[in-house]
């Protein structure tokens, strides 16, 4: 049945069969069914982590989860009335002040502090563990960690790893007792006697160790678990610390032409780069003044390296008169030399007459373009253009949001005797203004994404560290916006043995994944739509408001840390697949019978 009938069924058919009886319930969770769907899907799936092994039974349950999350978050973000499908929470036992959710939504990094404000850590959680979210490891930070960034990187030969970078600040002069840096906002310039010393810290952990700690077969808290922890090395190790007396406002982890770099803005005018595999290799970029504003104060607001390229978008603001700023959106090359470098842009455009509190640039990269292991499948959604780079402006006077997008340009690669004609794609700073949304008298804060974004709406007068959250809004690109691309030959002609890294297979010829066929259309209006959260926001506000919030656009997972209490809320804007609980253990025991179509086998009560 699995090989003769199920390959011709749609997901809706599988879900209908699941409701027939227990035998079909268990059978329709068979991984081979969902692996076939995965190979046929054109909807982007969440990014696969480097240590995800497609062929291992321990991760079988994740295949269905990838498919269901991709489809349901895509539908939810395009529907007229987006909603939160489910919620969960777990106890952190400390106060959480900053968070970062890695692509795919599996790993959450939280900046935590003890209630007496004497101890500080970065804590790494697995959010979707079968037995519920669990802490895997932590590293002391000695002061509040903020500007937290993380990226999967291979720093050492033969080992996949996770690099974490963050900023911490320390008083230069002794301050009054009880006054700690974490009491002061990290989002605004703070003028105190003596000022701060800022440190950019990078840390590393092996993904093999994390995968071991994440294993569903490893029961946390048992004697065997504690003995196994004693037999493995400490997960985290500190890589490097860079100090500055000037404020550090943004950190980015970069892979370019084989180099692994950490980069950060040292306000107001410098952009620093350090090689994570050779700490002596450092570069400092200083940008030339705009000719029309020579000698006027320029300040760097944000930057992001274009995915897969050795150049970047840099946004600077220049004040030609008190209270007036122009904003320069520039295209620069990454530094090719060590030391101090003065850089002029390859191209730029200028935004006038806008008061911008913050620029936010998406960092989604090129998801699933790289195969981490030979057993990982070639995915259809990686054909065609990569996602755009989105630039969001948080506006003031009036308050609102403006969105610009940099779409990649399609380049024809002529056919050769070995390969057919196909396309490559390059970001060349072609930028489109997509939309502007005025939300006054409320204020908007953007959690950026490449093609989806989450907008937090707060009261304009609420300037506390933990504002009350009035609404959560989804944002999606407007219909008929951006660039129209020609169909990629690799996605329309899969007869070649290998074209654009997609291999021909039987599943691809069996029609669409969903009976409804195409994806829901992007709405013509209402692209900034309030998400139905039920009473969740009221609960958060009753606990003092939002101290930290983050999200993952590929899964629609949102993590929120209220000001009071010690819990972290996990809100799901996608539907989750079954987890490997006791019912699925029953399925594993009996899958051999079910594989022989023994549907008449009497099933025990799960």
Image (cartoon, helix red, strand yellow):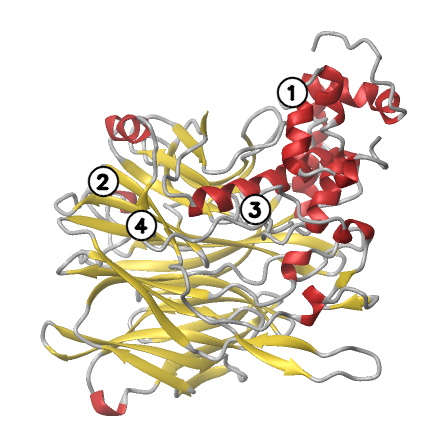
Residue pointed to by mark 1: 19
Mark 3: secondary structure: loop
Of tags 3 and 2, the one toward the viewer is 3
Task: State the mark number for residue 514.
Answer: none
Could you tell me which residue is drawn at 46 percent across and 52 percent down? 521
Residue pointed to by mark 3: 104
Mark 1: secondary structure: loop
In three-dimensional space, the C-alpha distance between marks 1 and 4, rounded to whole angstroms, equals 35 Å
In three-dimensional space, the C-alpha distance between marks 1 and 3, rounded to whole angstroms, equals 29 Å
Q: In which quarter of the image is the N terminus?
A: top right
Q: In the figure, residue 597 lies in which quadrant?
A: top right
Of tags 4 and 2, the one toward the viewer is 4
Whether residue 51 can be seen here: no
Residue 150: x, y in percent?
52, 53
* Callout 3 crowding tier (Cα within 10 Å): few <14, some 14–19, many ≥20: many
In this picture, is 109 found above or below 429? Answer: above
The reply to whether discs 3 and 4 touch (Cβ–Cβ < 8 Å) is: no
Instruction: Give the residue furthest to the bottom.
Output: 291
Q: Earlier in the sequence, mark 1 or mark 4?
A: 1
Mark 4: secondary structure: loop
Could you tell me which residue is drawn at 69 percent across and 28 percent down? 216
* Callout 4 crowding tier (Cα within 10 Å): few <14, some 14–19, many ≥20: some
Of tags 3 and 4, the one toward the viewer is 4
In three-dimensional space, the C-alpha distance between marks 3 and 4, rounded to whole angstroms, equals 27 Å
Could you tell me which residue is drawn at 37 percent across and 46 percent down? 143
Could you tell me which residue is drawn at 53 percent across and 50 percent down? 519
Q: Quadrant of the C terminus?
A: top right
Residue pointed to by mark 4: 526
Residue 453: x, y in percent?
39, 52
């Amino acid at each position: 049945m699995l090989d003769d009938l199920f390959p011709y069924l749609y997901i809706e058919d599988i879900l209908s069969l699941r409701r027939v009886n227990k035998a079909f319930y268990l059978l329709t969770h068979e991984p081979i069914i969902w692996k076939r769907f995965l190979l046929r899907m054109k909807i982007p799936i969440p990014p696969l982590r480097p240590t995800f092994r497609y062929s291992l039974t321990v991760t079988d349950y994740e295949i269905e989860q990838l498919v269901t999350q991709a489809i349901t978050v895509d539908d939810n973000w395009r529907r007229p009335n987006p909603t939160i499908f489910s919620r969960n929470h777990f106890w952190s036992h400390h106060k959480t002040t900053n968070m970062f959710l890695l692509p795919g939504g599996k790993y959450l990094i939280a900046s935590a502090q003890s209630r007496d404000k004497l101890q500080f850590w970065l804590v790494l959680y697995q959010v979707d563990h079968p037995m519920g979210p669990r802490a895997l490891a932590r590293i002391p930070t000695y002061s509040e960690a903020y500007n937290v960034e993380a990226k999967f990187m291979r720093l050492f030969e033969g080992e996949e790893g996770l690099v974490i970078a963050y900023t911490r600040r320390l008083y230069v002069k002794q301050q009054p007792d009880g006054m700690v840096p974490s009491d002061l906002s990290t989002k605004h310039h703070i003028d105190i006697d003596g000022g701060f010393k800022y440190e950019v810290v990078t840390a590393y952990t092996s993904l093999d160790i994390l995968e071991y700690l994440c294993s569903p077969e490893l029961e946390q808290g048992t004697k065997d678990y504690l003995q196994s922890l004693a037999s493995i090395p400490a997960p985290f190790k500190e890589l490097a610390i860079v100090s500055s007396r000037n404020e550090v406002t943004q950190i980015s982890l970069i892979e370019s032409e084989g180099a692994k770099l950490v980069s950060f803005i040292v306000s107001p005018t410098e952009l620093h780069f350090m090689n994570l595999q050779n700490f002596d290799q450092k570069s400092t970029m200083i940008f030339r003044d705009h000719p029309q504003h020579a000698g006027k104060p320029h300040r760097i607001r944000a930057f992001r390296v274009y995915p897969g390229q050795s150049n970047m978008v840099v946004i600077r603001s220049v004040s030609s008169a008190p209270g007036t700023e122009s904003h320069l959106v520039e295209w620069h090359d990454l530094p090719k030399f060590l030391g101090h470098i003065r850089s002029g842009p390859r191209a730029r455009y200028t935004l006038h007459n806008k008061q911008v509190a913050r620029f936010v640039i998406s960092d989604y990269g090129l998801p699933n373009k790289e195969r981490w292991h030979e057993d990982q499948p070639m995915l259809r959604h990686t054909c065609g253009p990569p996602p755009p780079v989105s630039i969001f402006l948080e506006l003031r006077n009036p308050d609102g949001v403006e969105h610009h997008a940099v779409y990649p340009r399609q380049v024809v690669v002529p056919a050769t005797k070995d390969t057919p004609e196909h396309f490559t794609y390059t970001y060349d700073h072609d930028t489109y203004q997509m939309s502007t949304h005025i939300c006054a008298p409320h204020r908007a804060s953007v959690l950026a994404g490449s093609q989806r974004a989450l907008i937090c709406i707060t009261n304009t007068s609420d300037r506390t560290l933990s504002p009350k959250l009035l609404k959560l809004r989804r944002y999606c690109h407007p219909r008929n916006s951006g660039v129209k691309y020609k169909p990629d030959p690799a996605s329309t002609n899969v007869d070649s043995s290998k074209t654009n890294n997609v291999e021909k297979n039987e599943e691809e010829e069996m029609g669409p994944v969903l009976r409804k066929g195409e994806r829901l259309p992007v709405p013509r209006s209402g692209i900034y739509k309030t998400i139905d959260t039920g009473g969740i926001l009221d609960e958060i506000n009753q606990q003092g408001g939002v101290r930290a919030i983050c999200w993952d656009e590929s899964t629609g997972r949102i993590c929120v840390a209220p000001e009071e209490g010690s819990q972290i809320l996990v809100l799901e804007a996608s539907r989750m697949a079954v987890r490997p609980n006791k019912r699925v253990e029953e399925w594993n025991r009996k899958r051999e019978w079910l594989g022989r179509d023994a549907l008449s086998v009497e099933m025990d009560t799960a």
